[in-house]
Image (cartoon, helix red, strand yellow):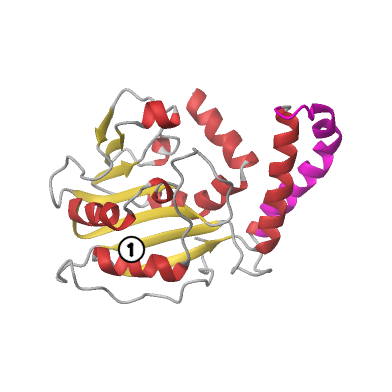
Amino acid sequence: MASRLSYRLRSLLDLQVASVLRALKPWLAGLKGNVLEVGCGAQPYRHLIPSRCAYLGMDWHKAQTAFGYRAADVIHFDGRTFPLKEGFFDNVFHTEVLEHIDAPLRFLRECHRVLKPGGGLFFSVPFQARYHYIPHDYWRFTPAGLEILLARAGFSDWDIAPRGNDIVVAAYKVVSLGFRWLSGKDRSLLLGLAFAPVAGLALAAGHLFLRLDVGSTDDCLGYNVRAYKPLDVPRDQPGPTARKAGTQPSNGG
């Protein structure tokens, strides 16, 4: 119950989370079979996975000390190799994880390895985001860079969709400033309280413009990525680009 309340609050107050959910929620709803979440943390999206699926959460073996995450039914990996069988999972997903991986290509190859032929991958990465979980925050990815990684990892038919636009980014920055002041960590609680109405309006505007096809997606919050393990293409052969990166899909995903 507490985790679902936390999920609802984050999806309302955090524009990064809201922008991920616009694509992740419908993707999860259509899943069947064995599902692996890598870097699962507190598993905030587990309740969105259909009951017909067999879910497994996996996290870095230092996730508790580095990030403060602890869950009972999670297996751990060393940050390099997944302790899992090849070709076992129908779908794999991870959200806001790849920027914390020191070897992202190797990580994506592991995602590819544990997928069944034809299996699906979903992941999100930030673009406009603060330096976080210091010092374990290594990368920011562009669509061109993601295409290179996906091709070299052996995936095909990928779709790289921007999350929001420059208007949403501006709103996100205003909201972030308000939250920082309200936290009072730099002795600015009173300033935060005075600024709260402005932050509230910015939050409402951010949610609105996440749904409107306006602004520039070249300056976005991040990217939602979907890709597939080919049925009959060797792992070292890159797959085709399904759609030009940087264009918003018609279904809002």
In percent of the image, x 58 and y 37: which residue is there? 10
Which span is picked out in magenta? 185-209
Looking at the picture, does residue 45 appear above or below residue 146?
Answer: above
Q: Is residue 87 left or right of residue 3?
A: left
| Residue 206 included in the magenta stretch of the image | yes
Residue 15 placement (x, y as % from top left): 62, 47
Location of residue 49 by image quarter? top left
In percent of the image, x 46 and y 40: which residue is there? 135
Which residue type does callout 1 highlight?
A: Ala
In percent of the image, x 13 and y 45: which residue is there? 85
Looking at the picture, does residue 155 appear above or below residue 76?
Answer: below
The 10 Å Cα crowd at callout 1, few under 14, some 14 to 19, many 20 or more, is many
Q: Is residue 207 left or right of residue 44?
A: right
Location of residue 47 by image quarter? top left
Q: Main secondary structure of the magenta part?
A: helix
Residue 216 placement (x, y as % from top left): 65, 70
Secondary element type, mark 1: strand
Residue 163 placement (x, y as % from top left): 55, 59
Q: Residue furthest front?
A: 135
Residue 177 placement (x, y as % from top left): 73, 42
Q: Nearer the viewer, residue 77 or 206?
A: 77
| Residue 125 included in the magenta stretch of the image | no
Q: Nearer the viewer, residue 122 or 78?
A: 78
Q: Residue furthest right?
A: 194
Q: Nearer the viewer, residue 101 or 111?
A: 101
Looking at the picture, does residue 241 appear above or below residue 115?
Answer: below
Q: Which residue is mark 1?
A: 227
